[in-house]
Amino acid sequence: MPPSPEKQREMLRLMQTIRRFEERASDDFHAGGIYGVVHCYIGEEAIAVGVCSALERDDKIISTHRGHGHCIAKGADLNRMMAELYGRETGYCKGKGGSMHIADFGIGMLGANGIVAGGIPIVTGAGLAAQLDGKGRVAVSFFGDGASNAGPFHESINIAAAWKLPMIYVCENNQWAAQTPSSSTLALPDVASRAAAYGIPGVIVDGNDVIAVYEAAVEAVARARAGDGPTLIECKTYRWRKHTERPEQGDRRPVEEVESWKEQDPIPRFIEYIRSHQGQLSEDEWQQMDREVLATIEASVDFAKASPFPAPEAALEDVFAD
Amino acid sequence: MPKITYAKAAADAVAEEMRADPKVFHLSTDAPQPLLKEFGPSRVRETPITESALTGIAIGAAGSGYRPIFHWGIVTFAFVAMDQIVNQASKIHYMFGGQAKFPILFRAMVGGGGNRAAQHSQSPYSMYMNLAGLKIILPSTPYDIKGLLKSAIRDNNPVISFESSRLSSLEGEVPEDDYTVPIGKADIKREGSDVTVVALAWLVHEALAAAEELAREGISVEVVDPRTLVPMDKDTIRASVRKTGRLVVADEATPTASAAAEISALVTEDPETFARLQAPVIRVCALETPIPYAPVLENHVFPDRHRIIAAVRQVVGG
C-alpha cells in the first residue's frame, strides 16, 4: 500500500533535502570550506527515503562512505551534519569524523563508514541486539553493488539467515564500484539472486521509484518484525556524480550513460506520481517546498560557519570511553 | 583459598559476569558446553567460522547496549577479522565523537610450545598495541585472568585478552568471592634489588624460575608482570628499573616492533630512569622466524629460563 498523501509530501521533502544538501556540500567542498573527501548520493535519493520511510525511530540503519542521504532520511539534524563537514565542534562527531563518518546513535543511525562492506556486519550486530531485546525492532544495512562482492556481505547474510535476524539488506546497485563497472565483477546480472544462496527472499526494485522502494521495504520490515528473518532488496539506480568530489577523481563512465540516467531522476518521477495519484501538488507548492528546503540548507551552513573549530587538544578526547 | 586452573578461572569469570549482567552474551565457534547449558542458545551463540563478520556483529551489538564476549579461538583466526578490529573497533568510539560506547571482550589464545607450527603458535599482541582505542590484557596466572576478564567485561571499551595456551592447565589460588584486577596495573611477582625482569605471559613463570636459580648465586631479581599491555603501567616498570638499575625484557614474541621494544623504550626515554641504568637493556625474545614444528626447532626459537639467566648475568656484568 502506498504511503498517505501527507507522508508522500514528507518523503518528497526529504529527497529534495538530500539533493540540495549535497549540491551545497559539493559547492562548499570545491570552495574550500569542507575538507578531505565528499561522496555524493545525488540520483539515489529514492532509496534512502523509500527505505527509511518504512522504519520507526528505534530501528537501526548503517550507511556507507556515501552516507549523507541515509542520515537525512533517518532524521538527522542538518545543522550538526553540515557542522561536521565543516570540521566544527558542534558537528555530530565534534569534528573528528567528517563526511565519511557521520553518525547519530540517538536516531538509530550507526554511522557512515569508509570501508566498503565494513558496516554490514556491524549493523547485523544491531539486528542481533534487536532480536535479543525482543521488542520487534529491525536493522537495515545500506551498501553498494561493490560491497556485495566482499566477504562481510556473504558472512553477515549467512549468519542473519541462520539466526533469523530482523535484518533488511539494501543493495544500492549504482552499477559502478568506484570506476569499475559491476558487469566486470559480477557474473550474474542481479545482486538479488545471491539471496537464494542463503535461503532468503531477494527482491529487485526500480531504485529511482521511491514508492516501489518503500513498498518493498514495508514488506521486508514486516517479515523481519514477525521473526521470519532477513530480506535482500536490490535497488537498481545510478550515481550522477563522480565517485568522489575530489578534483583528481576520474570518471570513465560514458557520458550518454550518465545522461540517460538523469532522465530517470527520482524526484520529478515522484512529483509526477503524486500528481497523477493525488493531484495535490501544484507547481507553486513544489517551488515553495524547494525554497523551504534551500532555506534549511542555508541555515545549516550559517550554523556551521558560526560554530567554533574544536580546540586542538580535543584531539586527545574520546580515544577511550569512561 | 581453592586452587583452580587458568582455563577454569577464565571460564568462571565469564559465567559469573553473565549471571550478573543479562546484557553479556557469548559468541564462539564450538560454544563452551557448560555455558550453553546454563544460559541457553540465545545468549551463548554457536557461530559459523566467520571471524570477520562476527567481530563486526560484536561491535554492532555493543553499540546497541550489549556487552558481547567473542572468543576468536587461537589468535591465528583473528587475523581475518583485522579490518573490523583496525578500521572499526579501535576507531568507532573516537571517529563518531564519543557518542556511543562499545564494551566488547575479544579473547584469543597465543603462544607456542605445543608443536603446532607457524600459524598456530603466534604471539602477535604488538600488532594490536599501536591501534589507539583498544585495551589489551595479557594475564599470566589464574588469579590475574579471572580478575582481569571481569574488569574487561565491565569496561566500556573494546578489550582484547591474549591468553597463553601454555598456561591453560596452570593451577593457582583464586578467591571464591567476587574480585577484579584493574586494567592498566602491573604486578610485581617477585621483589628483588639487582635486576628487573619485565616478563610477559608464560615468560613470567620462566622468569620466576630464573630468579630462584639466580638467587642461589646471590643475584636478586625483581620480576614485573605488566598484565596489561595497553594502557601500560609505565610507573611501576620505571620505578622498578630505577631501583635495580638494570632491565631484561622477556617475551615469546619476536623482538621487532614488539611489546618488549615498547617496554625498553618507555624505560630509556624517561630521563630519571635512564640516569639510573647501569647496563644496556636486553630483550629476551623469540628468534626472528616463523615458529617451526619439530620440537628441537621450536625449542631453539623460543626463549626460556636459561636465556633469561644468561641475560641477567650479562647485565650484572657476570
Image (cartoon, rainbow, N blue to C red):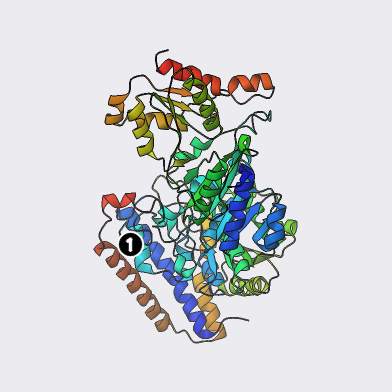
**Residue nearer the viewer, B117 or A184:** B117
Residue B118 lies in what quarter of the image?
top right
Position above or below: B123 against A200: above
Question: Residue visible at 61% across and 59% down?
Answer: B25
Subunit of mark 1?
A: A
Left-right relation of A283 to A160: left
Label 1 belongs to which residue? A83
Position above or below: B251 against A52: above
Left-right relation of A240 to A1: left
**Residue nearer the viewer, A102 or B10:** B10
Secondary structure beneath dot 1 equals helix
Residue B65 shows in this picture: yes
Question: Residue visible at 69% across and 60% down?
Answer: B38
Left-right relation of A217 to A23: right
Position above or below: B84 against B109: below
The disc labelled 1 sits on which kind of residue?
Ala
How far across and how far down the image is residue B296, in percent?
A: 67, 19
How far across and how far down the image is residue B8, in percent?
A: 64, 47
